Image (cartoon, rainbow, N blue to C red):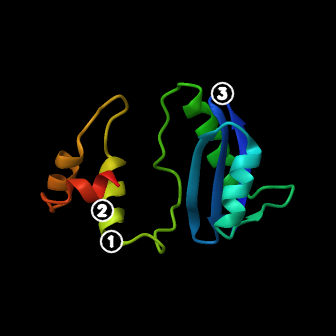
Amino acid sequence: MLYQSFQTPMGSCGIAWNRAGLTRVLLPERSTDVIDERMRKLGYRPAPHVLPADAARTIEVLSVYFDGEAVSFDEFRLDWSGTPPFARRVYQTLRKLQRGSTTTYGDLARQVGNPSAARAIGV
């Protein structure tokens, strides 16, 4: 499991992946040191100097996104194997939201078929 930290207009970010796809995205932090420390604690190793094409493309799209541009994340291969079924349903539902849309934890809970799970979604 490899990772790469990178700079965006909003700060340092990180992605991690394995052969099956993207496993983690760390949102902007104040420095790459913070990203690197978090990734290493999670068991990821730094990527080699030359990134796989999928990882390089992910960084490119995320950089454009954090610059305020509209992008699609549909092209990313995701490895859901470490994601519990409930969280997976929540994430898949969130991916369908249009850019600029908002929702509530309660609405998400209803959409994933568990109306009493708003608190669990918010955690």
**Which of the two discs, 3 and 2, labels the residue nearer the N terminus?**
3
Please, what secondary structure does the residue beneath circle 1 have?
helix
Q: Is residue 58 left or right of residue 119?
A: right
Cα gap from disc 3 to disc 1, whole angstroms: 33 Å
* Residue at position x 33%, y 71% in the image: 85
| Residue identified by numbered label 2 | 89
On the rendered structure, is 107 left or right of 51? left
Which amino acid is tagged 1?
Pro
Report x, y in % for residue 40: 72, 64
User: Left or right: 18 with respect to 111?
Assistant: right
Q: Are marks 2 and 1 in contact (CB under 8 Å)?
A: yes
x and y percent of residue 65 in the render?
55, 33
Quadrant in which the C terminus appears: bottom left
Pick the front one: 51 or 116: 116
Residue drawn at x 51%, y 51% as measured from the top left = 75
Q: Residue at x 24, y 55 (%)?
A: 119
Seen in the image, is 115 located left or right of residue 22? left
The residue wearing badge 1 is: 85
Q: Amino acid at mark 3?
A: Pro
What is the crowding at mark 2: few (fewer than 14 residues within 10 Å), some, or many (at least 20)?
Answer: some
Q: Is residue 112 visible?
A: yes
Q: CA distance from mark 2 to mark 1?
A: 6 Å
- Mark yes or no: residue 61 visible: no
